[in-house]
Every structure is written in structure tokens, then in C-alpha cells.
Amino acid sequence: MDGLLQKYNEYIRLKNCRAEYRLSNGEILDFTYKEENFIHLIGLHKLIDIQMIQLLNDKSNKIVKTGYIISRIKKGRLTDEMVKKSSFYKEISDRYDKFSYDNLTKLTYTDAIINFNSKRINSKIKSDYLLFEEEDEGYNHLGIATDTLTKNRYIETFFYQNTDMYIKGQTVVKVNSFTLYSSDGKIIVTDNF
């Protein structure tokens, strides 16, 4: 099976599942996994030398949307090989290589940045929260943003950073517990820290 399709199939297992993180400051951080977030989470939007991605990023384009890109992945018309041949692949390689069901649902995100201030590091990230964990020589980050219209939270980004630049100078709290619920509200996994 194609590597990109495999990553999509892993992610789609989480479609409409709800994650809930209880934080040490009393806040409850929850969000629902949505299919349309896959393209951005894995970083495909940064591969601007792939024509269909150029069209996806073009605000005036009315045809190529997230659903179209996902259909191309399912049909084998956008593949792992194409992604890795992109001259922009280097920008997403850590994110792409580490993207997995396990990394998205890890019970080891034991810390969270609340009220993330992207201006401190000149970042375009819109996330209010960044869950993070140490891995290897750096950190996995899971960015959670709030939709301004619906006020619902969603996963905005997933990435690996080999420094603490996203953490330094931010407000960090501990994660007390994590629960993952299926789309029908049943507990898939839960853990306390």
C-alpha cells in the first residue's frame, strides 16, 4: 500500500472521535478529529510545486478543495513518491515521517502550552494550545485551535521540532488525564498522569 494512503487510512480511523485532555489548571481541552484536517496536519499544503496543491492553496480556485485532494490520495493519484520528490519535502519531512495514528493519540502528551503566543517566535500557527512531548532530541507538538465561527476546537497542526523554540517563554501546564472517545461516545482509551 502507498505510504501516503496508509497515513490517510490511519488518520481516518480517528474520524469523528473526540479527544479530551484535562489540564492541571482545571481546563478541559477537547476536540474532534475531522477528515478535512488531514491535508494540513500532514503538511501537504506546503508542497507548492505539486500542481493540485498549488490549486488548493489558491484562494480564487473553486474546484480543488480538501475533498478533491483526499480523493486523489485514495485513487493513487497523489502518492508517497510524489510527496517525497517535491522540492519542498524537506520542509515537512519530520512531520510527514512521524505522522501516525500512534503519534496523534499518544498518551504521553504530558504537557500543554495554554494561550500559545505565536508572535513570540514569528509563527503563523493559530493554535491556542500546543500539546507536546519530548522525543529523541526534540519535541512532538500537537496544535489545537478554535474555530472563530463555531467555537469548536480542531487539530490545526502536528509537527516535530528539534529545539524548544515553541515552548520557551510560553505558559506550560501539566496534562492530568487523557480520554479518547469513539464517535458514539464510548471510551476507546483513557489514562491519568
Image: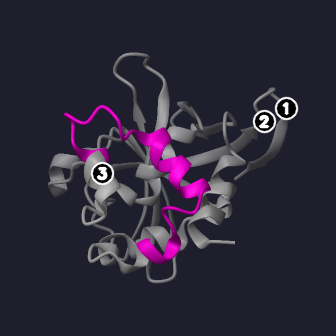
Per the rendering, the mark at residue 186 is 1
Task: Point out the frontmost of discs 1 and 3.
Answer: 1
Q: Measuring from the top left, give residue 116's x and y in whole percent.
A: 31, 44
Part of the protein shown in magenta: 56-82
Q: Earlier in the sequence, mark 1 or mark 3?
A: 3
Q: Under tag 3, what secondary structure?
A: loop
Q: Measuring from the top left, give residue 158's x and y in whole percent.
A: 45, 57
Q: Measuring from the top left, give residue 19's x and y in whole percent.
A: 65, 39
The residue drawn where x is 58% and y is 33% is 30
Residues 30 and 98: in front is: 98
The residue drawn where x is 36% and y is 69% is 92
Residue 105 visible to the viewer: no
Q: Under tag 2, what secondary structure?
A: loop
Dot 2 corresponds to which residue?
182
> Within the image, what quadrant is residue 50 found in?
bottom left
Dot 3 corresponds to which residue?
170
Residues 61 and 128: in front is: 61
Residue 59 visible to the viewer: yes
On screen, 1 above or below 109? below
Q: Residue flagged by tag 2: what amino acid is it?
A: Ser
Dot 2: few (<14), some (14–19), or many (≥20) neighbours within 10 Å? some
The residue drawn where x is 74% and y is 48% is 192
CB contact under 8 Å: marks 2 and 1: yes
Number of numbered discs visible in the structure rendering: 3
